[in-house]
Image (tube, grey):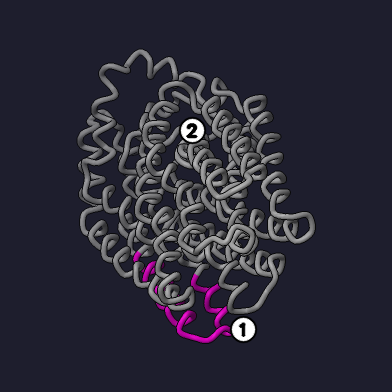
Amino acid sequence: MAFHPIAAGDEDPDTVTVERPYAWIVFALTFGLLISDYMSRQVLNAVFPMLKSEWALSDGQLGLLSGIVALMVGLLTFPLSLLADRFGRVKSLALMAMLWSLATLGCALAENYQQMFLARFMVGVGEAAYGSVGIAVVISVFPKHMRATLASAFMAGGMFGAVLGMALGGVIAAKLGWRWSFAGMALFGLLLALLYPVIVKEARIAPRRAMAAANKAAAAVKRPLRTLYCSRSVVSAYIGSGLQLFVGATVVVWMPSYLNRYYDMGTDKAGALAALIVLCSGAGMILCGILSDRLSQQSPERKVTLAIAYCLGSCLLLSIAFALPPGPAQLVLICLGMLIATGITGPAGAMVANLTHYSVHGTAFATLTLVNNMLGLAPGPFVTGKVSDLIGLHAAFQLVPLISIAAAAVFFYARCHYHNDIARLKGERGNTPVADVALEVRS
């Protein structure tokens, strides 16, 4: 039977071992819940045209319905992830999924904009800590050298969820009405929320970690918590990731409306084509993460260099795309731009994991999620909607890719300090075996 040891340098190598088949089952179920998370979040985008017409809403109001979810995720991800780290990640994930699914069902029952806003608010509360706690569970059962691949593959579940949410939501809305789009996403999430704690057990993914943490809690918490913010490169990873996701989130949220307005597509066709573009983004997350792991084994700074390249490449491709008139050439360039626009997810996630202590990984990814939402996912759709009300959606899209230049600059700053910050973290741990230090520096 094959096993995955715990990530080197976080604890003693033999503290936790997880059977490989079970590790992949944990990944699959956690990945499935992330898909449900984003299906519930992004189905709204597919029915924007219907809500705009039925309730006479402005683009700013529509953007706020999307942005409120990301805002609540940003505000609550840190405290809820900290609680999950302390009181059990598996139970916390199941409760989160139950809450966002019930709130999505509330969206289906909303009779006006105010009720819809409240339901979306609760979707955000439910989803707040899922991404950070979920990825902490996933990386706990796999080797350290797979971190960028796992982070990018796991977070790509958000893109695949967005694909399914927009594509299925658009088709269901065209045939049965927009309310059934929300109801379908809610039922899927409720099923997975009930199944998850039955199969994934805290005792199997961390059989001795909970006892060890309890015995060393008073001495262990203060120093690991410092790793969340004590290095310039980890802070830069948070900020660079958030700025770049401003671009990706905006395109994902507003693409169905863009296709509806400028390509004269119906809700079903616009949702399907927008889903294809988002699928390119999800595939790009995985491919860019794999490339990062492959090219960075002997050079830790290279993953940051790749993040810079992803930012600048997406800026160039999307700027050209939205300078063109609507047509096939524009759509091809949008797909290519989105293929690498979210490529920073893997490198940024690996940087955060490598620069923080295992015991606070849930909180570390919560911090990453917080910044992603406060700098990118929340303001992106809302600000673009406000700008669209003033100058039109096409002109607003021409401005969005420029944010990637700022993201590239922040990642460049991280690159200047990454190697020294990794080495300093190893020195502070003191009792980490030399072989484990070398492995983590290379990763």
Residue at image position (44%, 70%) is 389
Question: Could you tell me residue 34's position as x and y percent?
Answer: 57, 44
Q: Is residue 326 magenta?
A: yes
Question: Could you tell me residue 298's position as x and y percent?
Answer: 36, 56
Q: Report the number of discs.
A: 2
Q: Is residue 196 left or right of residue 310?
A: right
Residue lying at the far top of the rendered structure: 215
Nearer the observer, 285 or 417: 285
Please identify the dominant SS of the magenta region: helix
- Disc number placed over residue 5 in the picture, else none: 2
- Residue located beneath label 1 in the image: 328
Q: Compared with residue 6, is residue 403 higher up or lower down, i.e. above or below?
A: below
Q: Secondary structure at mark 2?
A: strand
The N terminus lies in quadrant = top right
Nearer the observer, 145 or 129: 129
Residue at image position (29%, 24%) is 221
Residue at image position (72%, 45%) is 184
Q: Which residues are magenta?
A: 308-337
